[in-house]
Image (tube, helix red, strand yellow):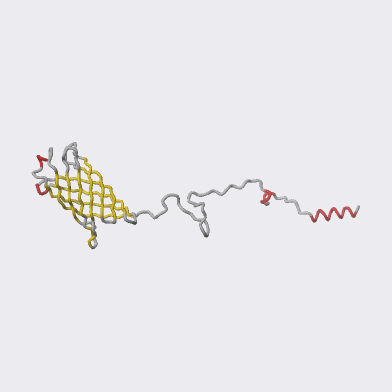
């Protein structure tokens, strides 16, 4: 009897104790682990040396803006038709104004160009003919420009206030400023078309 009791006591002490605190034992946890979520900014393909983060979308540097402005002078030709025959003595006009150019710099051979200018023509005939232009286009190799947009002539007839305008230009750099050479054309279905050749200085 004593021998059997001793044997049972020795066996119970040598056995591994059953865990009493289930919360402290991870092996006894019944909660399912949540799968690791993948962030939208994370590249699932690991790079050498560790994971790599990359924002979805345009991964390059943001484009920079450049602004230049300056005065314009030049020559304008206006085809005389309709009301223009009454207010102008000649199709040849002197024009002067001011222009602002915004460039979205692409960092290479191509820039996006936005041009706004206000011009006054007809001073050589004692006339005041204001116009405004807004053009969108491109600049190639920081010198050649091409664009198209809207021309506004507030003193024209009621059906001639808004026109299309197209322009091309060459802008070489001379020292610390630029000298633009621009040509523009404004078509008109009624024959009141006009064209301009202008130059000036940008800084």
Instruction: Name the quarter where the C terminus is drawn.
Output: bottom left
The answer to which of 98 and 181 lies nearer the viewer is 181
**In the figure, is residue 100 to the left or right of 23?**
left
The answer to which of 17 and 195 lies nearer the viewer is 195
Q: Which residue reaches farthest top?
A: 159
Q: Residue at x 33, y 56 (%)?
A: 108
Q: Position of residue 170 (x, y in %)?
A: 23, 54
The quadrant holding residue 176 is bottom left
Q: Position of residue 115 (x, y in %)?
A: 25, 50
Q: Position of residue 70 (x, y in %)?
A: 22, 55
The correct choice, above or below, for 141 with respect to 148 in the image is below
Q: Which residue reaches farthest left?
A: 89
Q: Which residue reaches farthest right?
A: 1
Callout count: 0
The answer to which of 68 and 8 lies nearer the viewer is 68
Q: Position of residue 57 (x, y in %)?
A: 43, 49
């Amino acid at each position: 009897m004593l021998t059997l009791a001793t044997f049972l006591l020795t066996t119970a002490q040598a056995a591994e104790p059953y865990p009493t605190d289930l919360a402290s034992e991870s092996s006894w946890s019944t909660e399912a682990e949540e799968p690791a979520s993948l962030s939208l900014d994370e590249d699932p393909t690991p790079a050498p040396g560790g994971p790599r983060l990359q924002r979805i979308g345009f991964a390059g540097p943001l484009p920079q803006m450049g602004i230049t402005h300056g005065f314009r002078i030049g020559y304008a030709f206006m085809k005389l038709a309709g009301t223009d025959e009454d207010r102008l003595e000649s199709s040849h006009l002197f024009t002067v104004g001011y222009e602002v150019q915004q460039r979205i710099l692409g960092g290479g051979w191509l820039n996006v160009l936005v041009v706004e200018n206000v011009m006054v023509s007809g001073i050589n005939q004692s006339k005041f003919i204001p116009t405004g232009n807004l053009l969108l286009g491109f600049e190639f190799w920081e010198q050649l420009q091409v664009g198209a947009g809207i021309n506004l002539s507030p003193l024209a007839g009621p059906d001639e206030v808004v026109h299309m305008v197209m322009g091309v230009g060459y802008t070489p750099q001379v020292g610390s400023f630029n000298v633009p050479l621009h040509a523009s054309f404004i078509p008109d279905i009624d024959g009141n078309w006009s064209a301009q050749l202008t130059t000036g200085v940008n800084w």
